[in-house]
Amino acid sequence: MSRPRGRQELWDIVINLFKGLAITLRQLFSKSCTIQYPEERLVWPPRTRGRLVMPRNPETGKTRCTVCMLCQRICPNGSIEITTRTNEAGRRELVDYVHHLDRCTFCGLCVEICAFDALRMSHEHELAVEDKARLKRRLQEESVEFNETWQGGLTK
Ligand code: SF4
Ligand code: SF4
């Protein structure tokens, strides 16, 4: 059986009720910290790690990849699959550069290890697909135009 409430106890309840209402009222007129996605978008910090991309030189149309294979070796979960061939001059050439987006943890190690600045992490982060096969990205074919002022990559 609950004991009868004293005057002090009732007074505390009223005070706390008004304290709660004051917080609600303050929040009602303060600036919202949420946004109306997808109509509204946040501006991402420059070092945001989105989808891996392979920039290409707009003049030559070529990427900077020298097929050193370091990115494939350092990737902790085998997300990078590089296919090469040896040309007539006996040099190794890039045939296919596959990035398995479904395995990637966006750790950025591949970008950091590449001494030729051939990889960048873009700000593209809306990567949901209905067909899992579409997560197998061919970076050489999808390569984006390289721009020195591009803000989409990890700073080295
Ligand atoms: S992307 Fe960079 S690290 Fe990877 S194979 Fe090409 S040059 Fe080497
Ligand atoms: S970001 Fe990390 S997990 Fe993703 S491909 Fe590069 S090294 Fe592999």
Image (cartoon, rainbow, N blue to C red):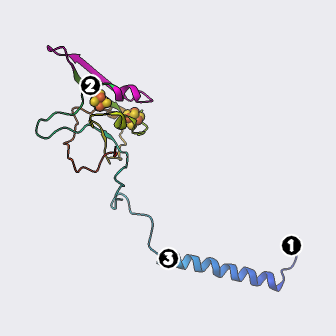
What is the spatial separation of the Cα atoms under label 2 and label 3, in whole angstroms? 57 Å
Per the rendering, the mark at residue 67 is 2
Q: Nearer the viewer, mark 2 or mark 3?
A: 2
Amino acid carrying label 1: it is Ser
Would you say residue 75 sits in the magenta stretch? yes
Amino acid carrying label 2: it is Val
Judging depth in this view, the residue of 65 and 11 nearest the camera is: 65
Which badge, 2 or 1, comes first in the chain's sequence? 1
Q: Residue, x 22% and y 17% (percent of image)?
A: 85
Q: Helix or strand or loop: what does disc 2 sit on?
A: loop
- Image coordinates of residue 113 in percent, x first then y, are 36, 34
Q: Which residue is labeled 3 in the image?
A: 28
Q: Which residue is labeled 1 in the image?
A: 2
- Image coordinates of residue 50 in percent, x first then y, are 35, 45
Q: Residue, x 18% and y 14% (percent of image)?
A: 90
What is the spatial separation of the Cα atoms under label 1 and label 3, in whole angstroms? 36 Å
Per the rendering, the mark at residue 47 is none
Q: Residues within 10 Å of mark 3 (few under 14, many from 20)?
A: few
Would you say residue 86 sits in the magenta stretch? yes
Judging depth in this view, the residue of 33 and 145 nearest the camera is: 145
Q: Residues within 10 Å of mark 2 (few under 14, many from 20)?
A: some
- Quadrant including the C terminus: top left
Judging depth in this view, the residue of 132 and 35 nearest the camera is: 35
Compared with residue 36, is residue 109 higher up or lower down, i.e. above or below?
Answer: above
